Amino acid sequence: MNRSLQDIQLKTDVLVIGGGIAGCMAAIRASELGADVLIVEKANTRRSGCAATGIDHCWSYIPHIHGEACSVEDIVEDHAKNAGGFIFKELVHRIADNSYERILDLERFGVPMRDENGVFRLVKKIHRVPSFIHFAGRDLKAILTKTVRSRGIKILNRAMITDLIVKEGEIAGCVGISTRSQELFAIRAKSVVLTTGSVFRLYGNPTGMPFNLSHPPSETGDGRAMALRAGAALINMEFITMQTGPKFFERCGRGTYVPGVLRDGSGKRLGTPAEHPANGSDSGSKRIDSSVAVNARAVGALHAAVESPEGFMKTIQEGRGPIYMDCTANSREQIQYIEWALRNEGNTVFLDHLSQEGFGLDKQMIEFSVYEPKLSNGNSGLYINSSCETSLPGLYAAGDAIGGVKRAVCPGALTLGWFAGEQAAGAARRAVCADFDFTGEKEVKHRKEMVSMISNGQGDATWQEAQLALQNIMDDYGGLVRSETMLKTGLSHLSWLKKEMLSDINAANPHERYRTLEVFNLITIGEAVMTAALTRTESRLKPGYHFRADYPSPDDTNWRKFLTVRRENGHLVTDTVPL
Amino acid sequence: MPPKIDSEKCDACGRCVEVCSEDVFYGSTVKRHPVISYPEECWHCGACDVECPKDAIYFYIPLPMRAKGRSVAETR
């Protein structure tokens, strides 16, 4: 690729990087408050992020339904327990407290949150009350995109932001590159909201197919990587999470199989069974009203996989596999409910596949397994304060990109996205915005140099090779079994890989170029993971998985605290934050 | 893995190309049938299928991805 890059300079008040649920909400709120807003999205906001082709569940604290049974503080306590105390209570409180307002917003935008009788379908999962709303969210992103456009918010699709520009210790804008053309964007912004989602493709896929994932492969932690490079801190990077779902077909690994029962190879039940929200005589959904909130007959769990990933692994290791999801005891109505939910969660391809293979959830048990490690679920990510601001002034973050809010998920994206947009609009009003010529900025120069190296290289390496090399390193040196010697070696190997990539990769076009840049970001994140894992000299299962073979037990005396990672003078350093 | 397009049904509206979350249709030309340049990067989100007004898209599922089921009778 020898055509030179074309400089495009843009300007906005609030720049939102990542057009998923959190990003769209941030943009809508900032715009409402009078800011000029631009969303930059790597794909197309209409069908991007975790909710690309749908989401069927979103928890909420609904005062008129839950009020008599529990308080917002109770919800926060449930999160704290689930995360082993590694949670920012103030942020979770804000999420729970504002969740219902945002649900009402979604309804105003046109998302059908209730059933045909105007009632919420509520299921019980991680809270003491049924708090997960099941809804027909297939077109959520399309509806959010329509709302965004109707408010005059600009969207730049097919552009990958690569670097944040910092001037005098504050955010000033960013650099990005088109995923389809030779355009290089230099964007001047008064404040920035990072809503770039989680981190996938960091570890090897058990099926050997890197894009066979339960979550978007395009979420490569670009926000975390660029923030780290700019000097902002990340948190909980040592904790990885795993998920369970249909074996081999990971895309369907987020779904509702309720009621379903997990069984081992001899048919014995595993974990605890889930009940169905459709129990009862009505048409497939159960009503929770304030008088029966706690005693509701229709309590159910979202995933019938109420067996932990560790439980799955133990079952296999003890020779009792395979593990099956058994929905065969369900009624026709219950099976239809499951299929309705799966379709709204974006799993239509899986359902079509099952029927093509001659499988029916009512007749066959489906093999389930643990998937590869990832950094998601609100655990690890950008370190923010209670105003959604990162350690870099003017840089805000929300959604799956932030850490310390385990299980914030959809309501987290809705509420903190909204709030981050509000904060960013405020910061933009206060900002002293001096114009400057971007072409001279060091971040722009550096990015152009790097893009030139990987586009006009003499080598033969492909980004796919680099991705595999990275995943091999993460699996072996920074994965499920860690130790000091292995982590240190792993860091050295990652450093080697970066150098090799710069000299040997040859990206043939803008598509391969952005894939290459994604792998570089994954390496940056891998370094943060290994550095944090090296520092935490203990093992822990909550809030996420961190096992040190050289320190196999939890050390509550020394390690009941958060660990952050940031760059200082070119090196990664760690700090602790009290719980 | 890759989406497949039924060229009889496809009217080259380009919506699939516009929305693909992994840009597997990269390099497609406006008003021509889409090309699937990067089939191995398909996430199976189904966005192309959902947006296609002509129901012209179906999916090939590669062998390593195929789900496994087992009739209940076998284990009881």
Image (cartoon, coloured by chain):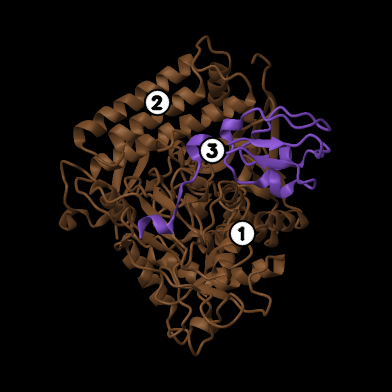
Chain colours: A brown, B purple
Residue type beneath disc 1: Asn
Picture quadrant where residue A530 is located: top left
Viewer-nearest residue: A149 or B13: B13
Residue A355 appears in the picture as rendered: yes
Q: Residue at x 57, y 69 (%)?
A: A332
Residue A398 appears in the picture as rendered: no
Q: Residue at x 68, y 57 (%)?
A: A139
Residue annotated with mark 2: A469
Residue type beneath disc 3: Leu
Whether A235 is drawn above or below B43: the answer is below
Residue annotated with mark 3: A164
The numbered mark 3 sits on a residue in which chain? Answer: A
Instruction: First in sequence, mark 1 or 3: give its number.
Output: 3
Residue annotated with mark 1: A344
x and y, in percent, of residue A146 in the image: 74, 56
The crowd level at tag 3 (other Cα within 10 Å; few <14, some 14-19, many 20+) is: many
Question: Contact (CB < 8 A) between labels 1 and 2?
Answer: no
Instruction: First in sequence, mark 3 or 2: give its number.
Output: 3
In the drawing, does residue A22 fall left or right of residue A538? Answer: right
The crowd level at tag 2 (other Cα within 10 Å; few <14, some 14-19, many 20+) is: some
> Circle 2 sits in a helix, a strand or a loop, which is it?
helix
Q: CA distance from mark 1 to mark 3?
A: 35 Å
> Circle 3 sits in a helix, a strand or a loop, which is it?
strand
Q: CA distance from mark 3 to mark 2?
A: 27 Å
Marks 1 and 2 belong to one chain = yes
x and y, in percent, of residue A359 in the image: 53, 52
